[in-house]
Image (cartoon, grey):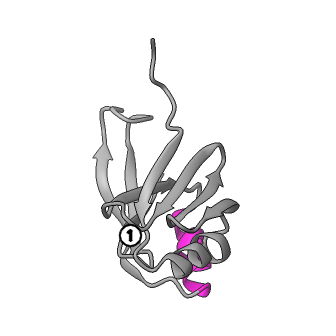
Amino acid sequence: MKLNRIRQVALAASDFDESLRFYRDVLGARFIAKFDPPGLAFFDFDGVRLMLERSAAPATLYYWVDDIDAAVAELTARGVVFDQPPHLIFEDGEGTFGPPGEGEWMAFFKDPSGNTVGLATRR
């Protein structure tokens, strides 16, 4: 057996309707279904399912982007406020996570329920 793909991630949605709107309308996730009660909403991010749940614990979710500066600019234009702008997290001189010499860059913001959302890229 080999576990090689994430199927679903669960995030807290304390403000259920605002969280649903945020992931669908601001981040552009494909909406799958809503079940209320019990307070579940499902979205698709290129084959990985995101489940928003009223009773889930807060989490951090990382999204890969090809151009972090363009992604931050686009989300800022949509009203997203970044806690941390794009910055170097790790200089990967040995190629631990990809080509040697590239760095891991990330930027962070909060969703309406207080979950941390990170954008990640390498350059």
Q: Is residue 38 magenta?
A: no
Find residue 3 and report its image quarter.
top left
Q: Which residues are magenta?
A: 68-78
Residue 10 in percent (x, y) is at 44, 54
Q: Is residue 90 visible?
A: yes
Residue type highlighted by circle 1: Phe
Which residue is situated farthest in the front direction here? Answer: 37
Quarter that holds the N terminus: top left
Which quadrant of the structure image shows residue 114? Answer: bottom left
Between 107 and 92, the one nearer to me in the picture = 107
Q: Relative to 11, is 15 above or below?
A: below
Residue at figure coordinates x 55%, y 88% from the top left = 79
- In front of the other: 77 or 57: 57
Residue 63 lies left or right of residue 47; in this view the side is: left
- Residue found at x 37% / y 69%: 115
SS at badge 1: strand
Relative side of 122 to 95, left or right = right
- For disc 1, the marked residue is 108
